[in-house]
Amino acid sequence: MRRYSEEEYLEGAGQDNETHYEFVEGRYYAMATPTDTHSFISSAIFVALYGHLRGKPCKAFKGDMKLRINFLERKVHYIPDVMVACDEEPRDRRFREEPVLLVEVLSESTRGVDEREKLFAYSVIGSLQHYLLVEQDTMQVTHFRRLESGWTEETFIKPEQVIEVPELDFKMSLAAMYA
């Protein structure tokens, strides 16, 4: 299997226009086609964040903005389902490097990568404060939050429970996420 350079990846070499690809260790990994439920949930979260952040320095992105990470001495590009980044002047407008919030809506094909590989990779991002793993087939959100003492994990399962992101002055109930 051919390895690509980071620049080849960013320019789209070897990719078709219909599929989104993540980039790890010089290789492309096609992202699974989302279900309608996956799309509804990620859209609800994105729309709430986008509206809340309108006119503010941080911006919300949904499923198409690349996240660049220097991970284990490699350049890695993931494409989170929802990302909020506060890069004032991004070095390259094709990706972001300073997210505050990352959201992945889980599916059977992505669960292992999202719960293990991405959790580990995302934890090295200094700006990241919140990582949400959102189930699509049941109402459940696992919220990883960075504190001074390290990462904490809390699971939410009730419609009236609210996820809070104080750095963005943002709150959203599970009922709204799963509407």
Image (spheres, grey):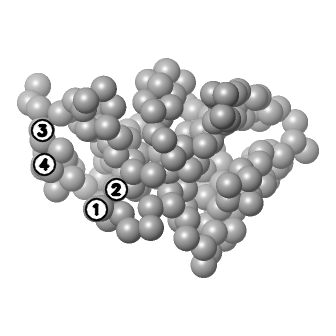
User: Disc 4 marks which residue?
Assistant: 8
| Helix, strand or loop for disc 3 | loop
Q: Earlier in the sequence, mark 3 or mark 2?
A: 3
- Give me the C-alpha separation between circle 4 and circle 2: 14 Å
User: Which type of secondary structure does the marked residue at label 4 adopt?
Assistant: helix
For label 1, the SS is loop
- Amino acid on which the number 2 mark rests in the picture: Phe
Label for residue 4? 3
Name, please, the residue furthest toward the left: 2
Q: Nearer the viewer, mark 4 or mark 1?
A: 1
Rendering quarter of residue 147: top right
Closer to the chain start, of discs 1 and 3, is 3
Q: Do tag 2 and tag 1 residues touch (Cβ < 8 Å)?
A: yes
In the picture of the structure, the residue carrying the numbered disc 2 is 95
Query: Of label 4 and label 2, which has the lower sequence position?
Result: 4
Q: Are marks 3 and 2 in contact (CB under 8 Å)?
A: no
Disc 1 residue type (three-letter): Asp
Amino acid bearing label 4: Glu
Q: Which residue is drawn at 46% across and 39% down?
A: 125
Give the mark toward the camera: 1 or 3: 1
Q: Residue furthest front?
A: 148
Let me know if residue 137 appears in the view: no
Tag in front: 4 or 2: 2
Residue 83 to residue 57: above or below:
above
Q: Which of 10 and 17 is in front in this view?
A: 10
Residue 92's disc is 1
Looking at the image, residue 18 sits to the left or right of residue 87; the answer is left
Q: Residue 10 carries which label?
A: none
Q: Would you say the residues marked 4 and 2 are in contact, meaning their CB atoms lie under 8 Å apart?
A: no
